[in-house]
Image (cartoon, grey):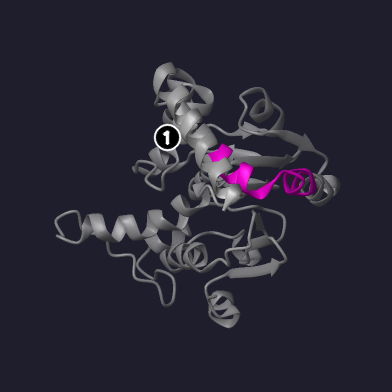
Amino acid sequence: MPELAELADIGLDLRVQDSVATVTLNRPGRRNAMTPSLWLGLAEVGRALPEQVRIVVVRGAGPSFCAGIDLRLFTAEGVPGEDFRLDPADDGFDEILASWQAGFTWLRDPRFVSIAAVQGHALGAGFQLALACDLRVLADNAKLCMKEPALGLVPDLTGTKPLVEIVGLPRATELCLTARTVAAAEALELRLAEVVVPEAELEAAVGDLVAALLGTDPAAARATKALLAQARANTLEQQAAAERKAQRSLLAARQR
């Protein structure tokens, strides 16, 4: 497991209780704005989670889930201790960006179900972090925005695929290229949220969802999540074959 003191230094907090891990973005003074160190820290958390973890809850301390990238990175002063030099001519460009993306991709792992608990702002990288999770529970004051195109960038932290899969290509195009803010009620209509609750009830709603998910057989849950992840790309025949294979493997494992 990463050292908690080291995570705290980059604005992260990790708590594991039994089979539930809670990852908290903990820079409330900056509305949990993200830095490269934080992305690398998220990736390290994903690599170090204990095998017994079945649920990962991602949340933000304070009034906002995450206000996106720390905009001070684009200034001459920058953020103390952060190296944000990203030269497209650099041979290591892809490797650097992939290391940052790894802070998001691990949340799709079939070993567990990931839940974003979102209150206040989820902008840019923060919106992409919520999209990286399997499920999203929003407070009624949540505001989502894919801000990168308005900053002269593309969304590059793995958010484009789930956005298109959830809302469809035309709506994803509109949301990204206008960089408009989506309030919680519209997010629910667009299926960007599984549920919207009053802000005061967010923690309880997440707790209820965690309890319901933990009621499912662990091996069946892992196998089903992996199976569902294949479904969109598979033909019916391919998915039927995948179902047969998954069922055989699950039942065989129980006979050992």
Report the span colored magenta.
209-225
Residue 216 counted in the magenta span: yes
Q: Which residue is mark 1?
A: 161
Residue 253 counted in the magenta span: no
Q: Amino acid at mark 1?
A: Lys
* Residue at the (14%, 56%) spot, across then down: 89
* Residue at the (47%, 68%) spot, across then down: 44
Q: Is residue 171 above or below residue 204?
A: above
Q: Does residue 180 show up?
A: yes
Q: Is residue 29 above or below residue 218?
A: below
**Could you say where residue 171 lies in the image, as x and y percent from the top left?**
49, 21
Apparent side of residue 175 relative to residue 210 in the rendered image (left or right): left
* Residue at the (48%, 66%) spot, across then down: 38
* Residue at the (64%, 48%) spot, across then down: 116
Decide whether the magenta segment is chiefly helix, strand or loop: helix
| Camera-nearest residue between 253 and 87 | 253
Res 152 quadrant in image:
top left
| Camera-nearest residue between 187 and 162 | 162
Q: 10 Å neighbourhood of mark 1: few (<14), some, or many (≥20)?
A: some
Apparent side of residue 117 relative to residue 200 in the rendered image (left or right): left
